[in-house]
Image (cartoon, rainbow, N blue to C red):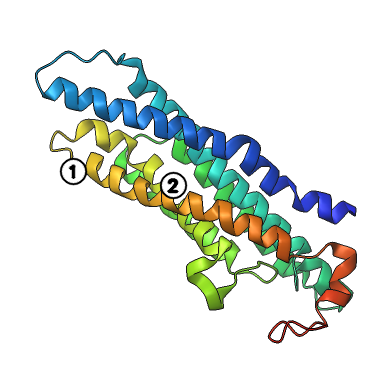
């Protein structure tokens, strides 16, 4: 493995060692929080400690940050080292400095908007920063070098990842509303969307493992990409 290949492992390594363990803890606390609320509404006294709700929120924020963070790391790697990315464009004398500067600024704005989303309290600013973060992720994902697998979007690691990241941004933006809404409308929306996010995370685990098998090492690409992928011959 070369240096480029080791850099490529940063994204999956963080996903395995950080993100997926947090997902397990968040789901566990979410289940306990839900059970405690239902038991209290039923008139009984729950034996589940009230601290599970606070822990669920705290770990949920960590999950949102880690998911968006590794998404940005993956996009940055792809834009620079991916097929037709900055390195390939430089080799073909097609790299434009203005494009590099604009994309770098887009990364900076996206990261800044996401950081400010954590600090924002008024609904308007939470909506603005969440929107800016979401737009940034989508725009960066549309750049050359990103392995999107658009012909199989329903089984694409990229589209599942962007979908999960956007759901995490949305979940972070509505935390304040969940606790202020007595009708539980935002809470129910949160539950439904994050159940869907959990399915996306499961899909991420499978598609990520598949892509690690399919994407060749850097020094192998010039030979592997000459193969006939339709007929599976080289």
Q: Give the residue displayed 29% in from the left and 48% down from the top.
A: 192
Lateral position of residue 100 relative to residue 190, left or right? right
From the top left corner, tell me how far across and down residue 47 is, in percent: 26, 12
From the top left corner, tell me how far across and down residue 65 is, in percent: 53, 39
Residue 61 to residue 9: above or below? above
Q: Give the residue displayed 41% in from the left and 22% down from the top.
A: 55
Lateral position of residue 209 relative to residue 8, left or right? left
Residue holding disc 1 = 185
Label ID, residue 52 = none
Q: Earlier in the sequence, mark 2 or mark 1?
A: 2
The Cα atoms of the two marked residues, 2 and 1, are separated by 18 Å
Quadrant where the C terminus is found in the figure: bottom right
**Near-viewer residue (60 or 169):** 60
Mark 2, Cα crowd under 10 Å, few <14 / some 14-19 / many 20+, is many
Q: Secondary structure at mark 2?
A: helix
Residue holding disc 2 = 169
**Residue at the left extreme of this rendering:** 43
**Near-viewer residue (230 or 88):** 230
């Amino acid at each position: 493995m070369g240096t480029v290949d080791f850099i490529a492992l940063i994204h999956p390594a963080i996903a395995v060692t950080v993100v997926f363990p947090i997902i397990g803890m968040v789901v566990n606390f979410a289940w306990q929080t839900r059970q405690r609320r239902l038991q209290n509404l039923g008139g009984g006294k729950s034996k589940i400690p009230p601290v599970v709700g606070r822990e669920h929120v705290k770990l949920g924020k960590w999950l949102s940050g880690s998911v968006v963070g590794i998404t940005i790391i993956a996009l940055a790697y792809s834009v620079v080292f991916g097929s037709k990315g900055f390195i390939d464009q430089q080799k073909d004398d097609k790299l434009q400095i203005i494009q590099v500067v604009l994309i770098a600024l887009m990364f900076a704005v996206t990261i800044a908007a996401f950081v400010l989303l954590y600090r924002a309290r008024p609904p308007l600013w939470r909506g603005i920063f969440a929107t800016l973060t979401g737009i940034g992720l989508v725009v960066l994902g549309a750049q050359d070098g990103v392995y999107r697998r658009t012909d199989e979007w329903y089984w694409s690691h990229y589209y599942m990842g962007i979908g999960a990241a956007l759901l995490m941004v949305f979940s972070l933006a509505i935390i304040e509303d969940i606790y202020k809404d007595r009708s539980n409308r935002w809470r129910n929306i949160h539950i439904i969307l994050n159940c869907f996010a959990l399915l996306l995370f499961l899909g991420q685990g499978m598609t990520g493992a598949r892509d690690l098998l399919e994407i060749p090492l850097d020094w192998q690409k010039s030979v592997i990409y000459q193969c006939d992928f339709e007929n599976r011959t080289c």
